[in-house]
Image (cartoon, helix red, strand yellow):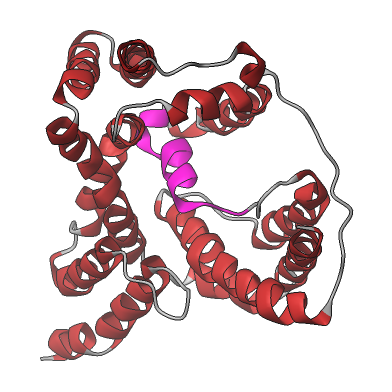
């Protein structure tokens, strides 16, 4: 564990150094909006299928959650996801009671523990460097592309440097890599977050509620341990359906670039991993290649 913490600290410092490279920021700025939206749609597809897969696995528990979301979407759309989450918590408690699973009150009390980092050349080569590449390729670059696709200018240097230093700072407490996650960006920057000039409230609120939830992390883990199969994933999928619809609309809005957008969407949705790098990165590369070759040639013809 100490060696892993040391590797995470090195990872954060490496990411911060990469953030100082202007060329990467320029690269993100050149990613077409349609491809970024197609990539996001592909990432979201599997998550948005989760409610319906879970409905087949645990219909008695998932159906009330889905019904709550549908009714709330009709009458109180802003509260649809929170109400679905409350319904899910209720279903989890019912399931725990029926199965006889015990949730110990002491498990709700969080605690902090410090892990003294240890640094080794093997951990740097075997963990820190691959994790840096994966974080940049699978999270930071796609996340920045998603933000740009919603019309926001990404402060590349300050964002990546601060997340890298933040990763190094929280590693001794068990924190994972902080990054520009594409899914979080989609939730906070999309149309469902309100008027464009007020979407910053969604980001601030997400941070504030995450801090509150951190204090209840032990309780969340205890509930998740007794949750029926798929119910937590179902709530997450319901929360992302609006973002999926918006991203699909943006991805295929331009007729001349639907081939590159379609291939980007399909590869991102496949979830394949090559060289430990997720499908989102490879989907963007494929889309850019098709756009620069096949679609450019078709435009000339």
Q: How many marks?
A: 0
Above or below, 165 relative to 138: above
Quarter location, residue 101: top left
Q: Position of residue 134 (x, y in %)?
A: 55, 70
Q: Is residue 144 left or right of residue 281?
A: right
Above or below, 260 relative to 162: below
Which quadrant holds the N terminus?
Answer: bottom right
Closest to the observer, 146 or 184:
184
Quarter location, residue 60: top left
User: Mainly helix, strand or loop, the magenta region?
Assistant: helix
Residue at 48% across / 43% down in the picture?
Answer: 184
Q: Is residue 188 magenta?
A: yes
Q: Is residue 297 left or right of residue 127?
A: left
Q: Is residue 143 magenta?
A: no
Q: Position of residue 298 (x, y in %)?
A: 13, 86
Which quadrant holds the C terminus?
Answer: bottom left
Q: Position of residue 186 (x, y in %)?
A: 42, 44
| Region in magenta | 179-193
Residue at 13% across / 66% down in the picture?
Answer: 255
**Outermost residue to the front:** 100
Q: Position of residue 11 (x, y in %)?
A: 73, 67
Q: Is residue 150 visible to us here?
A: yes
Above or below, 110 relative to 119: above
Q: Is residue 247 visible to us here?
A: no
Closest to the observer, 240 or 89:
89
Q: Is residue 2 left or right of residue 240?
A: right
Residue at 32% across / 37% down in the picture?
Answer: 240
Quarter location, residue 168: bottom right
Closest to the observer, 174 or 248:
174
């Amino acid at each position: 564990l100490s060696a892993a913490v040391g590797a995470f600290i090195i990872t954060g410092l490496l990411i911060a150094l990469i953030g100082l490279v202007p060329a990467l920021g320029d690269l993100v700025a050149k990613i077409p909006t349609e491809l970024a939206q197609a990539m996001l749609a592909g990432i979201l597809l599997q998550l948005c299928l989760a409610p319906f897969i879970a409905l087949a696995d645990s219909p008695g528990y998932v159906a009330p959650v889905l019904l709550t979301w549908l009714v709330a979407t009709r009458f109180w759309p802003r509260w649809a996801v929170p109400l679905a989450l409350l319904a899910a918590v209720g279903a989890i408690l019912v399931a725990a009671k029926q199965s006889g699973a015990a949730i110990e009150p002491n498990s709700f009390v969080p605690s902090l523990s410090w892990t003294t980092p240890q640094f080794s050349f093997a951990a740097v080569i075997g963990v820190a460097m691959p994790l840096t590449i994966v974080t940049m390729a699978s999270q930071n670059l796609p996340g920045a592309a998603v933000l740009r696709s919603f019309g926001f200018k990404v402060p590349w240097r300050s964002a990546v440097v601060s997340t890298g230093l933040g990763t190094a700072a929280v590693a001794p407490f068990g924190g994972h890599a902080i990054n520009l996650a594409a899914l979080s960006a989609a939730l906070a920057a999309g149309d469902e977050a309100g008027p464009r000039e007020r979407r910053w409230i969604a980001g601030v609120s997400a941070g504030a509620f995450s801090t509150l939830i951190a204090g209840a992390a032990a309780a969340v883990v205890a509930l998740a341990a007794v949750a029926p199969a798929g119910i937590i994933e179902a709530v997450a999928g319901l929360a992302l359906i609006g973002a999926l619809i918006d991203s699909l609309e943006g991805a295929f809005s331009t007729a001349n670039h639907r081939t590159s957008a379609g291939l980007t969407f399909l590869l991102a949705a496949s979830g394949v991993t090559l060289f430990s790098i997720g499908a989102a990165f490879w989907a963007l590369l494929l889309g850019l290649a098709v756009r620069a070759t096949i679609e450019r040639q078709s435009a000339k013809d």
